[in-house]
Image (cartoon, rainbow, N blue to C red):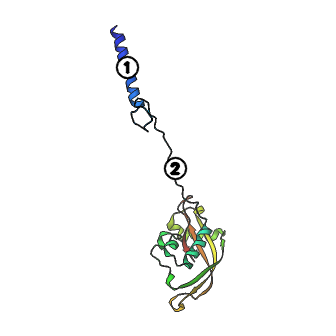
Amino acid sequence: MRGFKNGILILLIFTTSILVVGCSEQKVNDTKSENECVVEESFIESIKLPEAIKSPEDIIRDSFKYENAHQLKNLLTCYTTRYKDINFRLDNLESCRLDSLELITDKKIYKSYFTSGSGMINNIKRENARKYTVKYNVQYKDQSKEPIDSGDYETIYTLIRENNLGEWKIDGIGES
């Protein structure tokens, strides 16, 4: 009989602990009774995904757009951090126009970048580097303040990203 009472007591303690843990006396709203087991709804918090990563071509186009609009803060978002202290001489810029851009596929140019250029320092993989031939026109307000004349130019733009999911950034202009 004593073993039966101990078994009932253990069963009662076990059942009570399940009720205490499984059910709470929280009121979700006033229509619930106090003795009712309340199950809180679990939810998955939505994660705000960043906008789609812009292509290297979009970054070059945006840089010309921001430069032409004299928007330094936006322009700096197109460049790597090594350009963070450059003002791009926007105060003397009359206008700039992107005429064309073309992806460079010559492996020798990329090899040069990774063996003797900034690619040695950046420590990035080949798939995270792009080079473009960019043709553009630039006009200055006061030509005497500029190291180059107003006119048409063709130069190489180098864009990189830190990893396969990173944003493309301009890391060099006129460099191989």
Viewer-proximal residue, 46 or 85?
46
How many badges with numbers are in the image? 2
How dense is the environment of label 1, judged by Cα within 10 Å: few (below 14), some, or many (20 and up)?
A: few
**Which residue is the extreme one toward the top?**
1
The residue drawn where x is 35% and y is 10% is 3
Q: Amino acid at mark 2?
A: Ser
Q: Which mark is drawn over residue 46?
A: 2
SS at mark 2 in the image: loop
**Marks 1 and 2, the one that precedes in the sequence:** 1
Residue of label 1: 12
The N terminus - image quarter: top left
How dense is the environment of label 2, judged by Cα within 10 Å: few (below 14), some, or many (20 and up)?
A: few
Viewer-proximal residue, 10 or 81?
10
- Residue 143 point in image, percent of width and height: 54, 91
The residue drawn where x is 62% and y is 69% is 57
**Which residue is the extreme one toward the left?**
2
Query: In the figure, residue 141 lies in which quadrant?
Result: bottom right
Q: Could you tell me how far apart the alpha carbons at marks 1 and 2 are, in whole angstroms?
A: 42 Å
The C terminus - image quarter: bottom right
Whether residue 76 sits left or right of residue 12 in the image: it is right
The residue drawn where x is 54% and y is 73% is 172
